Image: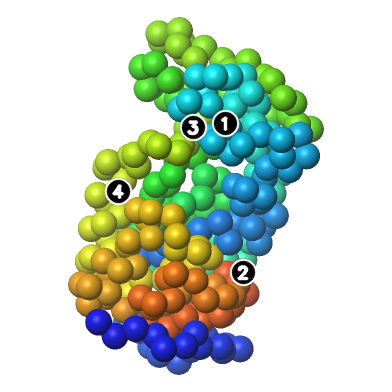
Amino acid sequence: MSVTEQPMKFNRPPPELIDRLRGASNVTIITGAGMSAESGVPTFRDASVGLWAKFDPYALASPSGWKEDRSRVWAWYEWRRGLVSRTVPNAGHYAIAQLAESLARNEGNEGKLTLITQNVDDLHERAGSLGALHVHGSLFEPRCSACGRQSQFVTEPPKEPIEHIAPPRCGHCGGYVRPGVVWFGEDLPTGLWHQAVRSARGCDVMLVVGTSGVVRPISDLPRLARENGVWVCEINPRATEVSKYANISWQVTAAIGLPQLVAARTISGG
């Protein structure tokens, strides 16, 4: 399997990337924390500041941490939900939604763009993307820790960090409602993961945007794509673990690069 020898620095979208995207009818995009960071959403570890800096991340994002202190874990996630709620999608989020609409319009069949995100925020949805595969869950989809049913928030998130907030109870079984994210030590949702794998193997072009490529099993998807003959482009301001599987590594941020790419594809006739 051939790999990229060096990341390629372009002020504008690489010509081959434009051509590949123009000719593609089935595109998969994987987004990571770097994309949301451009909107001001702190990465998981960057969120461990101030009050939360004194806690081990595992104590805030694991089944054992939940068992030890549910109100502390709930408070941390409510604080993060509040942070995300006060941010807005960036130009990269809107470009992905625009690309999906363009592909559906040109091919006459929705679903030609599959969006796989590691991010637990709702910025893709607020930018207009439909059906994103949130393989790590969502801050906005709490569920019962006992029966697993989807639940609802009963209060607004705090604007300032609060160390303890009692989680609500499930209206069905009375169990404690937990954050709807995948914690350390938990498996990814089986159905979503299988969809992600099928998409990685079956697409024409894969874009890997704003992710370091070190979190498994999502980091396996670019490799699976290359093994199945998919053309892979990494979009990231620096080289990462993804680079070795990419046909091209375009060193640019999502908010700058993706709008340029979508515009160039459109001008080129896609």
Residue 82 horizontal/vertical position (percent): 68, 36
- Residue that sits furthest to the bottom in the current view: 15
Q: Decide which of 46, 120 is in the foreground and name it.
A: 46
Query: Looking at the image, is mark 2 or mark 3 earlier in the sequence?
Result: 3
Residue 107 horizontal/vertical position (percent): 29, 71
Query: Looking at the image, is mark 2 or mark 4 earlier in the sequence?
Result: 4
Find the distance from the CA under tag 2 to the CA under tag 1.
33 Å
Whether residue 115 can be seen here: no
Q: Decide which of 37, 140 is in the foreground and name it.
A: 37
Query: Looking at the image, is mark 4 or mark 3 earlier in the sequence?
Result: 3
Say which element carries label 2: helix
Say which element carries label 3: loop
Find the distance from the CA under tag 3 to the CA under tag 1.
6 Å
Q: Residue at x 20, y 72 (%)?
A: 228
- Residue bearing mark 4: 193
Find the distance from the CA under tag 2 to the CA under tag 4.
26 Å
- Residue bearing mark 1: 59
Q: Does residue 186 appear left or right of residue 93 in this picture?
A: left
The crowd level at tag 3 (other Cα within 10 Å; few <14, some 14-19, many 20+) is: some
Identity, as a three-letter code, of the amino acid under mark 2: Ala
- Residue bearing mark 2: 255
Mark 4 or 3: the one toward you: 3
Colour mode of the rendering: rainbow
Mark 1 or 4: the one toward you: 1
Say which element carries label 1: helix
Quadrant for the N terminus, please: bottom left
Mark 2 or 3: the one toward you: 3
Quadrant for the C terminus, please: bottom left
Whether residue 133 can be seen here: yes
Find the distance from the CA under tag 2 to the CA under tag 3.
32 Å
Query: Looking at the image, is mark 1 or mark 4 earlier in the sequence?
Result: 1
Identity, as a three-letter code, of the amino acid under mark 4: Trp
